[in-house]
Amino acid sequence: MASLSALSSTVSVRVHEITKYLDNHGLPPPSFDADSPSTLPADPVVQRARLDLIEAASALTNLAIGSADLTRWQVLESKYDDMVLYFLARFKVFDAVPLHEPISYSDLARKVDLVEPRLRRILQHAFTNHYFYSPKPDFVGHTSNSALVANDPLAYAWIFHNVDEVEPWYSTKAVEAFTRWGDTTDPRKTGPNLAAKRGEGKTLFDLLETEEEVEWGGVNGKGWRVKRVGDSDKFMASGGALKASDLHQGLDWGALGKATVVDICGSIGNVSLEIASRNPKLSFIVQDKANLEEQFHNNIPTHEKSRFSFQPHDIFTPEPVKGADVYFMRATLHKFSDKLAVAIIKNIVPAMQTNKSRLVTMDVVMDGGDPTDQAGNEDAIDKARGQSPGMGQTGAITRLNTSIDLQMMVVLNAKERTREEWTRLFKEADQRFALTACRQPLGNSACVLQWMLKE
């Protein structure tokens, strides 16, 4: 077990490594200033030090709080962390505070149409998580954390989806749902359906299609929640530990040459656009529900339209594109039980060419993938050669992945999987499947897995 002194030493060493890299490359250090860089460099040296630093600093904080206070504080505080973010987003406080100068509480209260005493109380709690700060008495200004939300409208979608839907519909009712239905894989046996009559249960996807007189992102009435969840996913893919740009590290797309990529459940093409940005020889067929086609065409830039096409497709029917070079799914299979995931994979198998077509997935691997800064990846079939940083019992990536796993459990009765479980799943779909790569970009919670049919 780590001691205070050992943990503080680790923190000191890792901070020195990061600072040295930034100094040597003329880069500014992270700070709470509103214009501070929102991420550290992707260099493996920095990312390994960063993940060790997060884990050691978290443990150090835990020990400093002490077991006498930890449970007391956590249960009391955590629910209000979310409530405060929701409050600030709902009343658009993030946008109302000028980015580069402070504003008085009284002026801010008028801008967001709130009584000043309540606004002050909300912001005082936000300060403790470094969202906003008070540069002088009776004034509030942005920190780097609050400025990120103000600068990215998609962040609102992430906050609203989790605090307005996942928490009240699912996570707060998860224990009651489990008590009633046990370890089920039925996506209708979840929190929102506790009061439903037999046969009237709804999945998350059913609930998102509910008719309501609400507007989000240009979508009015039915479908606005679908658009918001799409924006929420886009926010997660655009940066941080789930960013889609890490796909470039996970697979040498350029080595495919002139090839066709079928992006299954590709929504409106955002992830394919990211892949396309560095691989001019690739063409893309994006498949998803027909009602997304108009948004897809509006989303693809004019200079890329010749390489992109949209095809309505239901993943529970046979894959219509035969012999493509790559069939690609990002964060799709984790939304389904093993039975349904196997059915999805089986629908792709007849379209693949043995020993040629690749089925590439980007998914969480609960026990980690092979770090992308290690040479070679040919022995990835059975087990990892070395654990990725952040993937220990108390690692930052582990904590993120267990949270994603719980989100899948309480919302869809689905799950994340270990490397062995992924391999077993694909083998159940077709014994010829071989896992030829399982690469985890440093700092990313997901792995890029490459599957081929081998004779």
Image (cartoon, helix red, strand yellow):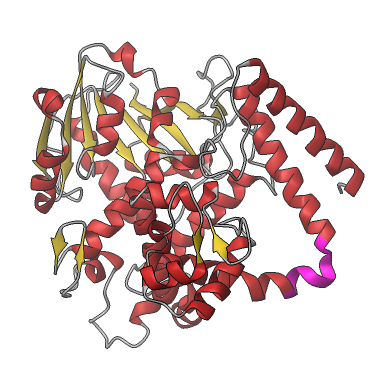
Q: Residue at x 50, y 72 (%)?
A: 83
Q: Nearer the viewer, residue 137 or 440?
A: 137
> Chief secondary structure of the magenta span?
helix
Residue 421: x percent and y percent?
Answer: 49, 45
Q: Is there any visible trace of residue 311 in the rendered image?
A: yes
Q: Is there any visible trace of residue 178 in the rendered image?
A: no
Figure check: 271 above or below 253: below
Residue 243: x percent and y percent?
Answer: 42, 38
Give the quadrant of residue 73.
bottom right
Q: Residue at x 9, y 23 (%)?
A: 306
Is 16 left, or right, of 368 in this rendering?
Answer: right
Residue 163: x percent and y percent?
Answer: 43, 68
Give the quadrant of residue 443.
top right
Q: How many marks?
A: 0
Q: Nearer the viewer, residue 410 or 163?
A: 163
> Which segment is the magenta one?
65-72
Q: Nearer the viewer, residue 288 or 135?
A: 135
Figure check: 67 above or below 254: below
